[in-house]
């Protein structure tokens, strides 16, 4: 089955700096890659996703890049703010099924 | 637009008791997922349904766990008898699957503590 690895497990940045979280996957059939943000006491919330037919997608301060050849994808948050502090999860999915394979999460702390 | 609704939000009970967790998916979504989240294991998929039919229950830890989806708007996850190691946050998620992948939408979970 698919195996998704996520790094780093914890990340601290100063407010205004950028944060980058990286994930790798093993199954070349994976073609959908969502990113989730989980705040304390809440469920994971989708923040951005990318499909395998594009290499990059942006939404304001958040961007995701995908390298299908290397089987890795990354989340980039620019101009970080304290409210960006949360746990972030990447996931991969194969089009023939709708099961997600999640990474182990990155705890991001933005220091004011 | 109501999201995925889970109840109860918190449950504290003694070991050996039956626990029932409930989930109402987003209207129109025909896939439903039950996850368990712990510090040690992260997010684990327990079971998922398509059109009310269980598709993959390989993540259900043991026979003490069972899940049902009697109709498109309701699902339950039952633990009987419960044990302290079942303590975790249980999430339900729903999606409308498509050939190109669709996001899963999560509820806010049930925090379960077994004493």
Image (tube, rainbow, N blue to C red):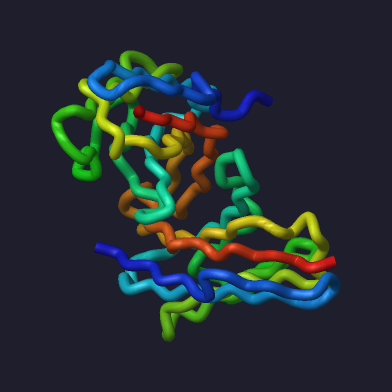
Q: What x and y, as percent, mark residue B88?
A: 40, 39
Please identify the quadrant where the C terminus of chain A is shown: bottom right
Q: What x and y, as percent, mark residue A34?
A: 53, 58
Identified at 23% across, 38% down, the residue is B60
Above or below, A79 against B97 in this view is below
Q: What x and y, as percent, mark residue A81?
A: 82, 63
Q: Nearer the viewer, residue A75 or B80?
A: B80
Please identify the quadrant where the N terminus of chain A is shown: bottom left
Identified at 75% across, 66% down, the residue is A110
Q: Horizontal placement of A20 versus A43: left or right?
A: right
Instruction: Specify the quadrant of the image occupied by residue B68.
Output: top left
Q: Nearer the viewer, residue B92 or A30?
A: B92
Above or below, B43 against B67 in this view is below
Identified at 55% across, 24% down, the residue is B5
Q: Horizontal placement of B34 versus A72: left or right?
A: left
Can residue A2 be seen? yes
Which residue lies most toward the bottom here?
Answer: A70
Identified at 50% across, 20% down, the residue is B7
Q: What x and y, as percent, mark residue A50?
A: 56, 63
Can residue A32 be seen? no
Above or below, B16 against A37 in this view is above
Query: How many numbered tags mark residues here?
Result: 0
Which residue lies most toward the front here?
Answer: B115
Q: Nearer the viewer, residue A25 or B77?
A: B77
Q: Nearer the viewer, residue B85 or A45?
A: B85
């Amino acid at each position: 089955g698919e195996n998704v690895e996520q790094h780093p497990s914890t990340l601290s940045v100063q407010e205004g700096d950028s944060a980058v979280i990286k994930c790798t996957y093993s199954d070349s059939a994976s073609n959908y890659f969502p990113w989730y943000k989980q705040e304390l006491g809440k469920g994971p919330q989708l923040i951005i996703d990318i499909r395998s037919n594009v290499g990059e997608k942006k939404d304001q301060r958040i961007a995701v890049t995908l390298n299908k050849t290397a089987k890795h994808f990354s989340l980039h948050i620019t101009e970080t703010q304290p409210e960006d502090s949360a746990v972030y999860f990447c996931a991969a999915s194969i089009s023939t099924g709708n099961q997600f394979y999640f990474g182990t999460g990155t705890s991001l702390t933005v220091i004011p | 637009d109501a999201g995925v609704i889970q109840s109860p939000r918190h449950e504290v009970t003694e070991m050996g008791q039956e626990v029932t967790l409930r989930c109402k998916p987003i209207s129109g979504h025909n896939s439903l997922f039950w996850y368990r989240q712990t510090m040690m294991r992260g997010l684990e998929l327990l079971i998922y349904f398509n059109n009310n039919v269980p598709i993959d229950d390989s993540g259900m830890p043991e026979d003490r766990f069972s899940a049902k989806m009697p109709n498109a708007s309701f699902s339950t996850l039952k633990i009987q008898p419960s044990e302290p190691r079942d303590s975790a946050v249980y999430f339900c998620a729903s999606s409308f699957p498509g050939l190109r992948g669709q996001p899963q939408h999560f509820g806010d979970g049930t925090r379960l503590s077994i004493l």
